[in-house]
Image (cartoon, rainbow, N blue to C red):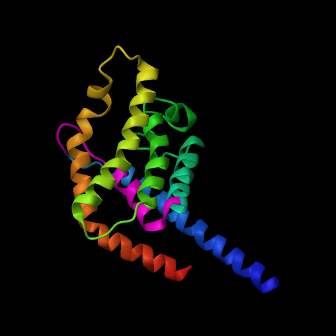
Amino acid sequence: MELINSLNYQKIFKYLVLAVVGSIILTISAKIKIPFYPVPMTMQTFVVLLLGITLGPILGSFSVVLYLIQGVYGLPVFSNSPEKGIGIAYFVGPTMGYLIGFVFASYVSGIFKYNNNYIVTFIKLILSVSIIYILGLLWLGNLIGWEKPIFSLGAKPFLLAEFSKIMLLTLLIKYALKFRKFISGIF
């Protein structure tokens, strides 16, 4: 019985390590700004979907939740922190819906089954990232008012960048799936 408990603790520890590493990668992706038109691009949404694909829906989402908890507690993990604030004040700002959408998008990207059909993979990834924008726009509309051009402010400037990231992830999907298989073999 002691051996079983020891194995369970080891497995939990390995999952926690993966989740922490995932949250660190997500933090790094938030801090690197790539010059892009019409706004600079981070790789956050790419990493959010990648976490779901490589770690699976539960562990991928948990990595994102861990990232959000770190940000709420004041660690400068978010894209524009500490420049535009930290902690709960930043979290409940205009980007909260998008940040919460990260959790659901990671989960959805993790539950999809992928194969060698790039068109189907691309559509699944578009559906996954759309969750981020739907929740983000709903929160933004409630925060600043629905009479404002919500789509033009909260989605339109990012569509070309999202398209590029989804194309890249579509092309890299087989490597992400190999990594997921590798991780599954370890655990």
Quadrant holding the N terminus: bottom right
Residue 3 location (% of width, % of height):
77, 86
- Rendered view: 10 above or below 155: below
In this view, which residue lies farthest toward the right? 1
Quadrant holding the C terminus: bottom right
Query: In screen coordinates, is 39 left or right of 72?
Result: left
Query: In screen coordinates, is 46 left or right of 89?
Result: left
Query: In screen coordinates, is 85 left or right of 38?
Result: right
In this view, which residue lies farthest toward the top? 147
Asked whether residue 122 is drawn in magenta, I would say: no
Give the camera-side residue of 168 and 80: 168
- Rendered view: 14 above or below 100: below
Q: Which residue is depicted at the point 57% across and 35% down?
A: 88
Q: Which residue is depicted at the point 32% across and 73% down?
A: 175
Q: Which residues are magenta?
A: 36-57
Residue 118 picture quarter: bottom left
Query: In screen coordinates, is 24 left or right of 150?
Result: right
Q: Which residue is depicted at the point 26% across and 62% down?
A: 170
- Rendered view: 73 above or below 152: below
Number of disc labels:
0
Give the camera-side residue of 23 and 15: 15
Asked whether residue 55 is drawn in magenta, I would say: yes
Q: Is residue 31 visible?
A: no
Give the camera-side residue of 180 and 10: 180
Residue 116 location (% of width, % of height):
26, 70
Q: Which residue is depicted at the point 35% across and 66% down?
A: 114
Q: Is residue 158 visible?
A: yes
Residue 98 location (% of width, % of height):
42, 39
In this view, which residue lies farthest toward the left? 37
Residue 14 location (% of width, % of height):
60, 73
